[in-house]
Image (cartoon, rainbow, N blue to C red):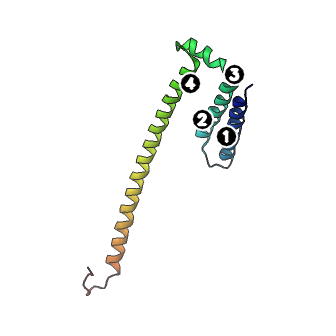
Amino acid sequence: MLAFQIIVILFCLYAAFRVWQKIRSRSLGSRWGAFWLAFWLGVGATVALPWTTSLLAARLGVTRGVDLVIYVSVIVLFYLVFRLTLKIEKLESNITKLVREIALSSSEEKTKNQEPNSRPQV
């Protein structure tokens, strides 16, 4: 086994351990936790047994195992970027609604607290 393989496998085990900790502390949902655990364990297995990607690539009609890994990686990355974009859009929409509600309730409180005979301040 090469030094590179050992380093990457150790890193994958560390990353999987950190994901497990985040799942247990409920900082990460079980669905995403399972995804990241599978991801890091899959990377570790791929680095430990590189010939498996060549076998899988041959069955799927891709010439080299490295090409298959790159194709799958790009697809997964674009999907994750898409999901993040949706989450960000939803958060921005929620923040906008919240700010509007706060502004309206603040405006109503100011109107209620003003004396009836006083002029509004500009």
Label 2 vs 1, first from the N-terminus: 1
Query: Is 17 situated above or below 107?
Result: above
Q: Residues within 10 Å of mark 1 (few under 14, many from 20)?
A: some
State the SS at label 1.
helix
Which one is closest to the eye, mark 4 or mark 2?
Answer: 4
Amino acid on which disc 1 is placed: Ala
Amino acid on which disc 2 is placed: Phe
Q: Residues within 10 Å of mark 2 (few under 14, many from 20)?
A: few
Residue at the disc numbered 4: 69
Residue 45 lies in quadrant: top right
Residue at image x 49%, y 29%? 74
Residue at image x 31%, y 85%? 115
Q: Quadrant of the C terminus?
A: bottom left
Which one is closest to the eye, mark 2 or mark 1?
Answer: 1
Residue at the disc numbered 2: 35
CA gap, disc 1 to disc 4? Answer: 19 Å
Residue at the disc numbered 3: 49
Along the line of sight, which residue is nearer the eye, 105 or 4?
4
Q: Which mark identifies residue 46?
A: none
Q: Position of residue 99 (x, y in %)?
A: 38, 62
Which one is closest to the eye, mark 2 or mark 3?
Answer: 3
Residue at the disc numbered 1: 15
